[in-house]
Amino acid sequence: MADLHLVVDRAAGGVAAQIARELREAVRRGRLAAGVRLPASRELARDLGLSRGVVVEAYEQLVAEGFLISRVGAGTVVAPVASRPALPGGTSRTPENRGGTPENRGGEEEREAHLGRRSTAPDLGAFPRERWLASMRRTLAALPADALDYGDPGGVQVLREELAAYLRRVRAADVSPDNLVVVGGVAQGISLTIQALAGRLPRGRSPHDLGWYVRRAARPVPAPGRIRLAVEDPAGGRQLPLLRAAGADLVAVPVDGEGVDVGALAASGADAVLLTPAHQYPTGVVLSPRRRAELIGWAAATGAAILEDDYDAEFRFDRDPVGCLQGLAADRVILIGSVSKSLAPGLRLGWVAAPPEIAESLRLARGELDLGSPVLEQYVLADFVTTGGYDRHLRRMRREYRARRDAFALALGEHLPEITVRGVSAGLHLLAELPYGWDEEAVAETAQDCGLAVEPVGPMRHAPGPPALVMGFARLPARRADATIRALADALSPGG
C-alpha cells in the first residue's frame, strides 16, 4: 500500500480538490505507479485529520477522471493508463513541460484515459465490472462441465433465446432463436452475410436458393461470387476493404436529411444495401418513416436485401428507440448488432437475425471456419441479460451520455457558434458542420491536439460536400466539456 505525502491547506478551502490534485500529480510524475493500492478512505482521512467524506469525494473524482480504479473488495488502485514513466533526461510529463493553455493541459495520460481517438468509442471506464463479474460467478457455479466443450457454431441456445427475446422487446424485431446467429461483432456479421448473399458460403438447409434476394432481369450481373452492394454516402471508410474482400462491388448512394436516398438507390441497380438507420454514421441522421416505407417497398419490388447495421440503436435521447427495419420485413432485412457500444468492443459478441436460409448458411460457415464464438462469454452475457443487468446498465448510460451530449453541444454553441451541430438525437457522436473555407483536416488535427475524439468527414465522402467533423462525446465527462471546447476555440482563433 502506498505511503502518501499530501500537502493540504485547510484554510484555503476546497480540501477534496486539493487532495485530488496532489494525488493526480503524484500519478503523473510516476510517484504512484500503475497498480499501486491507495489507503482506504477511512484510514487516509484519519491520517489527515479530515472527515472521510472529503477523501471519498477526492477518490471519486479521480476514479471519474480515469486516474484511479475502485472495486468492491479490492480497494482503490492507480489505473494502468494513468501513470507514465519519466521522459529521458529526467523530464516528466507534467503540465509545466507541455504546451497549451492551463485549461487544456491535462496531458496525454488524461486524454488517453478519457477520450480515445475514435469518435465512435464508448466510455470503457463505465463497463459494469461488478455486475459482469457477478454474472460470471453465477455462470461458473451453475454451468455443467460439458457446456465448456465446443458449442453450437451458431451460438449457445440460452444466449440466442435471451437475445431473441430482447430484440423482440426492445427493437421490435421479428426474430426467433432459430434465425439468430451469434457472431464475433458487427464486422464479422456483415462479412459473413455478404459472403452468404454472394454464394460464397455453404448453402443453408432450405428449399429456397440463396438467390431469394435477387431479381436481376433489369440489373447489371455481378461477377460470380460477388454482389452489387449499395453503401451510404458519406460512410465510414474502415469497413470498405472488409466489404470488398467479402465479395461486394460497392456503389455509393447519397444520404440527406431523411436518410438514404431511395430513388438513387433504385437507380443504382444494387442487389443489396448496407444501412445504419438508427443513427447514420457519420451524419447522425435517423431514417425517416417515409424512407423506411420506401426502402421496404424497393426491397419487395426488386428482391433486394437490406443489411441493417443496428449502429447506436441503444442510445436514443429524444424518445424511445425506433424499432428496427427488420421488424417490418423479416424476409428482406438482415439485422446485425452487437454489444460493442453498449458494453465494450473487446467482448467481440454480436448477432445476425436473418431469413432461415441465410441464418443456416452463417451457422454452417462458422462451423467450418472457426467453430463459433467463445462459449463462456456467451453464457455470461445470457445471464447478464436474464438478470436485468444489461437493461440497468443501458438506462444508466443513456442518462450519462445524454448529459455529456448536452454539455458538449452547449459548449460548442457558446464557444464556436459558427459551427452547426447536427445528428444529436441519438448515438455517441455528433456532426459538426464547419463554415465554408475552413480546412477540416487542420481543424480535426487541432481538435485532436486538444484531446477530443474527432475525425474529418471529407475522406468518408464519395461526392464532395461541405467541411465537417465527426465529434465523439462519449468519453468526455460533462464537467470537462466547456473547458475543452473553450481550449479548441482559443486554438482556432487567429492568435491561437
Image (tube, rainbow, N blue to C red):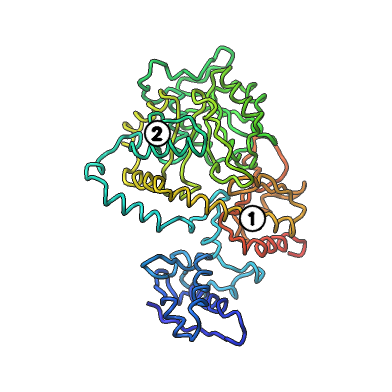
Q: Which residue is mark 2?
A: 181
User: In the rendered image of this protein, does residue 238 appear above or below residue 496?
Assistant: above
Left or right of 199, for residue 271: right
Please provide percent x and percent y for residue 194. Answer: 47, 29
Of 372 and 72, the residue lying toward us: 72
Q: Which residue is mark 1?
A: 445
Give the tally of numbered discs.
Answer: 2
Residue sitting nearer the eye, 313 or 23: 313
Q: Nearer the viewer, mark 1 or mark 2?
A: 2
Side (left or right) of 474 relative to 48: right
Q: Helix or strand or loop: what does disc 2 sit on? A: strand
User: Toward the viewer: 373 or 227?
Assistant: 373
First of labels 1, 2 by sequence position: 2
Whole-percent x and y of residue 460? 62, 40
Q: Quadrant of the N terminus?
A: bottom left
Q: Amino acid at mark 2?
A: Val
Residue 106's label in the rendered image is: none
